[in-house]
Amino acid sequence: MSLDIHADISLKPFNTFGVDVRARLFAEAHSDADVHEALAYAAEHRLEVLVIGGGSNLLLTRNVDALVLRMASRGVRIVREDCDMAIVEAEAGEPWHPFVQDMLARGLSGLENLSLIPGTVGAAPMQNIGAYGVELKDVFHSLTALDRETGEQREFDLAACAFGYRDSLFKHQPGRWLVLRVRFRLSYPARLNLDYGPVRQRLQEQGVTEPTPMHVSRAICAIRSEKLPDPAVLGNAGSFFKNPLVSAELAARIGEAHPGLVAYPQADGQVKLAAGWLIEQAGWRGYRDGDAGVHALQSLVLVNYGRATGRDLLNLAERIQTDVHARFGVTLEMEPNLY
Ligand code: FAD
Ligand code: NAP
């Protein structure tokens, strides 16, 4: 038996909101064997299991009466390579940003726009992480997951994951699939995506005329650091709401009433609205109620000034949802996973 199981542990260090709830049991899985041992233990003791990575997309609203299993498995290897590309496999517990930096240092491109996203490799497919015009699906090769219903391992290729906008098959079957490792298709020749928001402009300001993936990563890290609160300083889980996809008719109606509307037409005819803009227009920017608040620089981010509970943050989120719906007729969907 190699797994260390601890009783009655505070989860405050294990969620980036810094919410102080307790786990009935807590263990870290460093290998597939640890995962199997944890699941067997939980089955024997009739316990639920909550799998977590970096806790950066979680809102814990109560004590967790379960075995919390934190994925801490490590290992990165090239499983196939030619002169143009490499298939790289990383264990679920690998921290995301250091993994991105490792790939860039090896001359492999594709992940640069996803720099500085907190969390782990294993959680990245859950919501098909995305930023600055790139989503995980754009560099995804395949993954290995454990089916917790049958105990069998299964391989998922791109199509099987059913990735969508901050969405995947795994989000629709919560608790069923435990991701053990993920494989990425990365490229040696740089194929940069600079078209999103301020990336190109930032590179120009820095005097970079022939950007490399490393330049792009540094520019994105700088932009993110200026705008987003560092969870080590101010608790948060990044964007609290997804950007809503609405019909072209609704977007046009809102645009007539609010000429500054930030809207992006999609290939399928829908229009993506910037949720942060809607929240800001509704007057929530910088709002604070006790220790739960709306970040002053990015209204999409809810923050914990210290002692907010998960319930406080959820109440604030629900007030924002109700208000935005009343003003714009738009339903905002929460992004973090609630427990
Ligand atoms: P956790 O929060 O630990 O878990 C998230 C969910 O996945 C939970 O439901 C958990 O049960 C499940 N899970 C975790 N690991 C596994 C596994 N191995 N197998 C099965 N299920 C698992 N997200 C973006 O998409 N783009 C961004 O640009 C972005 N920026 C952020 C910036 C900040 C400052 C913060 C705090 C968050 C940001 N996020 C962003 C959200 C978050 O970082 C990502 O969603 C990240 O992938 C979550 O990883 P995690 O390991 O912390 O997952
Ligand atoms: P931003 O650049 O201020 O843009 C506001 C919103 O408009 C974004 O949410 C983005 O949608 C959308 N947008 C901007 N330019 C676009 C374009 N060219 N085409 C389509 N949509 C466009 O956003 P930000 O808050 O600073 O975040 C920058 C990037 O990091 C975004 O991609 C964002 O998703 C990502 N991010 C995500 C989280 C998270 O927790 N999920 C946290 C921080 C940052 P998209 O979000 O769809 O890209």
Image (tube, rainbow, N blue to C red):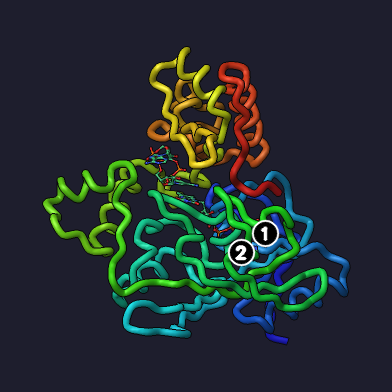
Helix, strand or loop at mark 2: helix
Which of 114/257 is in front? 257
Q: What amino acid type should be assigned to the residue bearing mark 2?
A: Ala
Residue at left offset 68%, top offset 85%: 2
Q: What amino acid type should be assigned to the residue bearing mark 1?
A: Phe
Which numbered circle lies on residue 170?
A: 1
* Image coordinates for residue 232, horizontal then vertical, percent: 44, 52
* Image coordinates for residue 159, horizontal then vertical, percent: 61, 64
The mark nearer the N terminus, 2 or 1, is: 2
Residue topped by disc 2: 159
Residue 26 appears left or right of 238: right
Residue 114 at least partly seen: yes
- In the displayed structure, would residue 66 be above or below residue 195? below
* Image coordinates for residue 56, horizontal then vertical, percent: 54, 53
- Number of disc labels: 2
- In the displayed structure, would residue 325 be above or below residue 315? above
Helix, strand or loop at mark 1: helix
**Which quarter is ligand 2 in?**
top left
Contact between labelled residues 1 and 2, with CB atoms less than 8 Å apart: no
Q: In which quarter of the image is the N terminus?
A: bottom right
**Alpha-carbon distance for marks 2 and 1?**
13 Å
Residue 28 at least partly seen: no
Find out if the beta carbon at label 1 lies less than 8 Å from the nearest ligand 1 atom: yes
